[in-house]
Amino acid sequence: MMAKPFASEADTAAKDEVLEVIGEGVYALTAGGDPTVGAIEGDDFLVCIEARATPHMADKWLAQLREHTDKPVRYLVLTHYHAVRTLGAAAFDADVIIAHDLTRALIAERGQQDWASEAGRMPRLFEGAETIPGLTWPDVTFSDTLTIPLGGARGSLELRYCGRGHTEGDLVAWLPAQRILFAGDLVESKAALYTGDAFHTDWSTTTLDAVANLGASTLVGGRGEVAHGEDAVAAAIEQTRDFLMVMRREVGAVHRDGGTLPQAFEAAHAALFEAYGHWPIFEHCMPFDVARLWDELDGIERPRIWTAERDREVWAELQG
């Protein structure tokens, strides 16, 4: 058998992007397995959600957004530290960049390595890499909640920390008046999960419980489709939980039996493939997902830092 191309380096085709107006002055741009971005109108300003991987790529999103509104970007919200979510921030010319306290700490600890890692894994998303001025640093961080008044009858945007999940520092952006939730990569809707920097037990239990308890009627996940309606929102959350729980069951069983990391990968891959194998980035994610979960089971509490070199080593061992 020929080895599978590394991660998403062979994924060179442009994706169909869909810009949806999901509420009054609320926008989401989805593109299958590519990271979702969004925006929320205040009375005389915008809050943008996520920054894309490069300013060049962010400019393409902003050009579509400008067909709907010319309000200036006052706030740029970053749901977590990953390079594909943060490095395009310069394009927004935002007055304030907001993230969780732990996201700032993770950028300081591993932002440079994550940049090199993700650029190697997903080169198509880094079109215009020369436009990146450096790591993105938030101006404002918080630990629990932060509220942004939108003005007039628009209500407020609530930024919340629901617990450890996709990373240590994920936040969600919640519009209670419209019951719209931007969940970042804590929830995916018809897209596979990346868990290489995750806390699988917390995420699959208390963190997703906190997300579900908000009671959203529209949910924008980190990748995949927008979930419209309470049933679709519940399905997206439970798909995310199921993916995590199946991984925990399969990898945990191999680990308890004294098996090997490749055996754990094969077991998890086989158990998940029928339900999720046709979804975007499944093959890309699985080696990194299983490697992180194996570390957790070995007692490594915090995710090890992914480097471009470690990426290739894990891929060769599990997908090669």
Image (tube, helix red, strand yellow):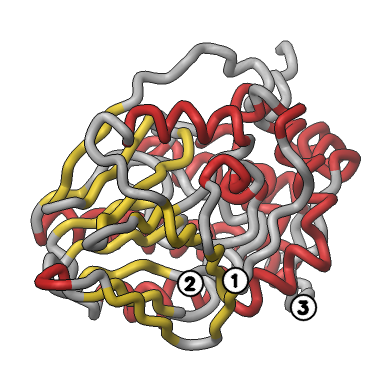
Quarter of the picture holding the C terminus: top right
The correct choice, above or below, for 305 with respect to 147 in the image is: above
Dot 2, how many residues are within 10 Å of its Cα: few (below 14), some (14-19), or many (20+)? many
Residue 31 location (% of width, % of height) = 38, 30
How busy is the neighbourhood of tag 1: few (under 14 within 10 Å), some, or many (20 plus)? many
Dot 3: few (<14), some (14–19), or many (≥20) neighbours within 10 Å?
Answer: few
In this rendering, would 28 be left or right of 284?
A: left
What residue would you read off at disc 2? 203
Please give the residue where the numbered disc 3 appears in the rendered image: 299
Which secondary structure, mark 3? loop
The circle drawn on residue 282 is none
Q: Tell me residue 5's x, y (percent).
A: 70, 19
Q: Going 77% across and 35% down the picture, which residue do you hit?
A: 315
The residue located at (58%, 56%) in the rendering is 195
Secondary structure under tag 2 reads helix
Instruction: State the residue lying farthest toward the bottom.
Output: 144
Image marks 1 and 2: residues in contact by CB distance under 8 Å: yes
Extreme-right residue of the structure: 309
